[in-house]
Image: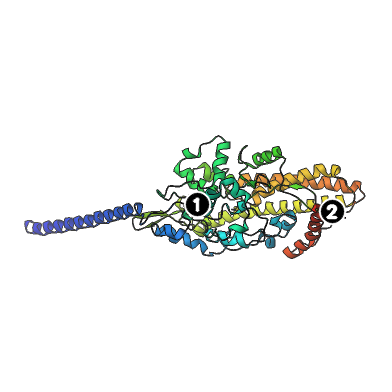
């Protein structure tokens, strides 16, 4: 027994030596990763000028973030109800042409692609013409804050879109969200700051986690132009961010965007109220920011950084959803799509009811109904389409707050049906007893052709009578 002890002694020595060697490697690796992290935090390779809009110049100091941002030009294809590819909403559902007849969104209405395409897409849409306000540049480029500073905010809004095409070249990027000296998140667009001030809130006191949503809320919100003279950009949040709150705001102002050429309804329009609806959902309640899902963290060596390929979480389930939800990718996608499919079903029913209501009011007027007779039906339809639009123009097909968007859509559908009952009572009083036959608007082209005579007639009424 004593003769075997030297063997065990050497074995223990070798094991301990190997253990010490492994611990040394681990310590060296940790030290190396820590050094990488420190270097990443101090990675300003050259100063970044104030109002620097060229994203590539920021990328010299922050190559990982810049390289991931560049991927926003990549078409990763569409998810079932969203994604980063091209999608023509009017072609997918020609009934929307009827809802927006006489308004720019009835001509051209496409899904927003990646941030890289922001300038290209806004300059090629059919919604833009020589009369378009410079305000429409506001969310499309980091060149905009420089132009606002140069001319003054009010003068920028008063200007025209087309003359600035040669000066707005850089798509949504670094300067829109980051301070050029510290890289801290910052608000670069005045409308969000002004909205917070009117609500009595100090945007300078919000947390970093809140800022990871608010930098998105500079643009992913609904808004309107105060009037045609100033084109001043305003977020209608004074009464709150809910659908009823925003409707109350507009009703107090007696505001409208256009008069529908078929039904004669004074219409309202929402623009992608993504932040507003996000605040009504479970993720906001749990403190999850927009960036947590759409710009999740990535690791490279010892460096943790934010992925700037802003995209649908369904295109990056592992880094987005599965950080919190311990289900398989297939289960997560199936769950999300199931929710969105049900939402789309309600949305489609509301779209049909609203389109028919416009046509039925128009038919009642055609058969002699007066503006006074139609006043109630028109006001009801104005409300129905506003609630529909609050949800329909939101990205995510209801996912950001499923219960809230279902509630609002139910309200839109009920109002649309009330309007249809009233419109058909009026038609009956004027001797029209048969249900109105729906025209063939099965394609975008057919829907546009159907709406054109009404639009032309409305434009003719607006033109002053030539002097003899």
Mark 1 Cα shell of 10 Å, populated few (<14), some (14-19), many (≥20): many
**Residue 362 appears in the picture as rendered:** yes
Q: Helix or strand or loop: what does disc 1 sit on? A: helix
Q: Residue furthest left?
A: 3
Which quarter shows the C terminus? Answer: bottom right
Q: Position of residue 57 (x, y in %)?
A: 43, 59
Real-space Cα separation, disc 1 to disc 2, in angstroms = 47 Å
The structure's colour scheme is rainbow
Name the residue at 75% across, 63% down. 442
Mark carried by residue 465: 2
Q: Position of residue 139 (x, y in %)?
A: 56, 52
Compared to residue 262, the image places residue 280 above or below, namely above
Which quarter shows the N terminus? Answer: bottom left
Q: Quadrant of residue 199?
A: top right
**Residue 331 appears in the picture as rendered:** no
Q: Position of residue 327 (x, y in %)?
A: 48, 54
Q: Helix or strand or loop: what does disc 2 sit on? A: loop
Q: Residue furthest right?
A: 431
Name the residue at 57% across, 44% down. 191
Question: Disc 1 vs disc 2: Cβ atoms closer than 8 Å?
Answer: no
Pick the residue in front: 120 or 444. 120
Name the residue at 57% across, 46% down. 153
Q: Which residue is mark 1?
A: 176
Q: Quadrant of residue 303?
A: bottom left
Q: Residue furthest front?
A: 468
Q: Is residue 339 left or right of residue 432?
A: left
Q: Is residue 374 left or right of residue 23?
A: right
Mark carried by residue 379: none
Which circle's residue, 1 or 2, is located before the other in the chain?
1
Mark 2 Cα shell of 10 Å, populated few (<14), some (14-19), many (≥20): few
């Amino acid at each position: 027994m004593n003769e075997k002890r030297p063997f065990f002694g050497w074995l223990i020595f070798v094991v301990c030596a190997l253990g010490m060697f492994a611990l040394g490697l681990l310590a060296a690796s940790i030290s190396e990763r820590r050094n990488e992290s420190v270097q990443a935090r101090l990675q300003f390779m050259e100063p970044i000028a104030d109002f620097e809009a060229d994203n590539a110049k920021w990328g010299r100091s922050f190559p990982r973030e810049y390289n991931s941002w560049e991927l926003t030009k990549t078409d990763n294809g569409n998810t079932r109800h969203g994604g980063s590819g091209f999608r023509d909403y009017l072609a997918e559902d020609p009934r929307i042409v009827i809802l927006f007849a006489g308004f720019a969104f009835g001509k051209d209405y496409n899904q927003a692609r990646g941030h890289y395409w922001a300038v290209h897409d806004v300059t090629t849409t059919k919604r833009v013409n020589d009369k378009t306000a410079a305000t429409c540049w506001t969310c499309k480029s980091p060149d905009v804050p420089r132009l606002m500073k140069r001319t003054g905010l009010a003068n920028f809004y008063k200007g025209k879109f087309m003359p600035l095409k040669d000066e707005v070249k850089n798509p949504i990027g670094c300067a829109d969200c980051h301070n050029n000296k510290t890289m801290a998140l910052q608000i670069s667009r005045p409308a969000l700051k002004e909205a917070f001030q009117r609500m009595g809130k100090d945007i300078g006191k919000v947390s970093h986690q809140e800022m990871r949503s608010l930098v998105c809320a500079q643009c992913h919100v609904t808004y309107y132009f105060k009037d045609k003279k100033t084109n001043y950009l305003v977020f209608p949040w004074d009464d709150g961010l809910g659908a009823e709150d925003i409707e109350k705001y507009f009703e107090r102002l007696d505001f409208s965007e256009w008069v529908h050429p078929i039904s004669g309804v004074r219409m309202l329009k929402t623009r992608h109220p993504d932040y507003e609806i996000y605040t009504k959902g479970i993720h906001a309640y749990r403190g999850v920011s927009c960036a947590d899902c759409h710009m999740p963290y990535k690791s490279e060596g010892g460096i943790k950084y934010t992925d700037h390929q802003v995209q649908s979480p369904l295109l990056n389930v592992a880094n987005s959803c599965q950080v919190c939800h311990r289900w398989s990718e297939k289960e997560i996608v199936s769950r999300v799509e199931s929710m969105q499919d049900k939402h789309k079903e309600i949305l489609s029913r509301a779209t049909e009811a609203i389109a028919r209501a416009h046509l039925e009011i128009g038919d009642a007027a055609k058969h002699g109904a007066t503006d006074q007779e139609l006043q109630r039906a028109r006001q009801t339809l104005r409300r129905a389409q506003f609630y529909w639009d609050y949800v329909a123009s939101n990205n995510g097909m209801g996912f950001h707050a499923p219960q809230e968007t279902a509630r609002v859509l139910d309200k839109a559908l009920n109002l649309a049906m009330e309007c249809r009952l009233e419109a058909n009572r009026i038609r009956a009083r004027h001797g029209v007893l048969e249900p109105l036959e729906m025209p063939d608007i099965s394609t975008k082209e057919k829907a546009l052709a159907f709406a054109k005579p009404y639009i032309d007639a409305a434009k003719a009424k607006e033109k002053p009578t030539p002097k003899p």
